[in-house]
Amino acid sequence: ELTDSTNMAQGFALLPTVWSVATFVGPLVGGMLARPQDHWPGLFGNPFWGKYPYFLPCHQPTLAVSGDADSDDSQEAFVQRPMANMPLRSLLTPTIVIPIANYATLAFLDVSFRALLPLFLSTPAYLGGLGLAPYYIGSWLAFCGIVDGVFQALFLAKIVDRIGAKRFFCVSVSCFVPLMVTFPIISWLVRARGIVDHTIIYPLLVQLVLTVTWDAAFATVLLFVTASAPAKNVLGVVHGLCQTSGSVARAIGPALATSLFAFSKQYNLLNGNAIYVVFIMLAGVLRWLGSQLPDEIQDRDE
């Protein structure tokens, strides 16, 4: 509601930027605190830490959440606008449903990739992964998060203003196919060289570029979701439907992605690469959904 047609892209560019701060801090802290008995045996020499090597990184977020909850006690009242008296069914029109379907599919593929990446990085090389330790995985994911955030903050709004929201969204979601292809390429490279060495950084950097471009689709599709609201007083309902759909997708994605990964490796389906084929096909569905978005974003000021 605080943005208009002149600054909507700049406003929504802040969302992935803030998200990227969390994707920087979370993996960095998680990777550093995992298996503390190996890194700081003098401080964590108790057998408890050997039995529960991931207790410390899993417990740390609960401290942050509890501290944040205490600080919200003083925030009591918000000025609320009355909502339009219209049934929810009346909002389920193609104008609203298509952007929400794009967002939900995008969220599903993104969270599946986010679950798949650390699993791939930690899987032993003989099974098609890289076999990296948690510290290195966390450091790499943190680096990816900060690069992603800087790109979104500095360039996303400029690119959207230059080439258009729909075109940039279609370009962004098209990156998911080569993003999936990088996984078997990296596996092949490790098998061919017989070792995980410095040359693996090049395909990982390519994967990072694709990830940053892919992640820009979130802010872009939210422009369409916002513009699809028939009135400002139902904007919250429309975004509520959008976030609910995305939450359902994010609940399903990690379980499905990790299960498909294990299933593909266990039964050697397509040489262990069946999971990537499945997600490439789902990416085609998202690309088609993107083509159904309106060519221009409706001006909410009119």
Image (cartoon, helix red, strand yellow):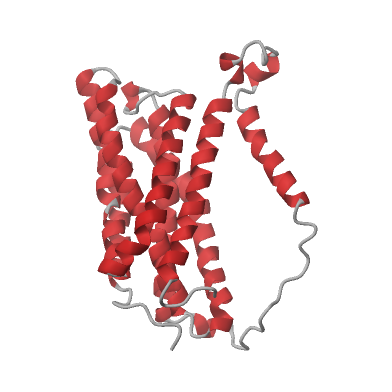
Q: In this orientation, which residue lies closer to the viewer: 61 or 112?
A: 61
In the image, is residue 35 above or below residue 69? above
Q: Is residue 231 left or right of residue 209?
A: right
Q: Position of residue 258 (x, y in %)?
A: 44, 40
Q: Position of residue 171 (x, y in %)?
A: 26, 59
**Residue found 34% across the figure and 37% down from its top:** 264
Q: In this orientation, which residue lies closer to the viewer: 164 or 126?
A: 164
Q: Position of residue 265 (x, y in %)?
A: 35, 32
Q: Quadrant of residue 29?
A: top right
In the image, is residue 243 above or below residue 67? below
Residue 276 appears in the picture as rendered? no
Q: Quadrant of residue 32?
A: top right
Q: Quadrant of the N terminus?
A: bottom right
Q: Is residue 103 left or right of residue 128?
A: right
Q: Is residue 25 left or right of residue 95?
A: right
Q: Quadrant of residue 38?
A: top right
Q: Position of residue 26 (x, y in %)?
A: 54, 39
In the image, is residue 109 above or below residue 145? below
Q: Quadrant of the C terminus?
A: bottom left
**Residue found 29% across the figure and 63% down from its top:** 168
Residue 20 appears in the picture as rendered? yes
Tally the marks: 0
In the image, is residue 69 above or below residue 43? below
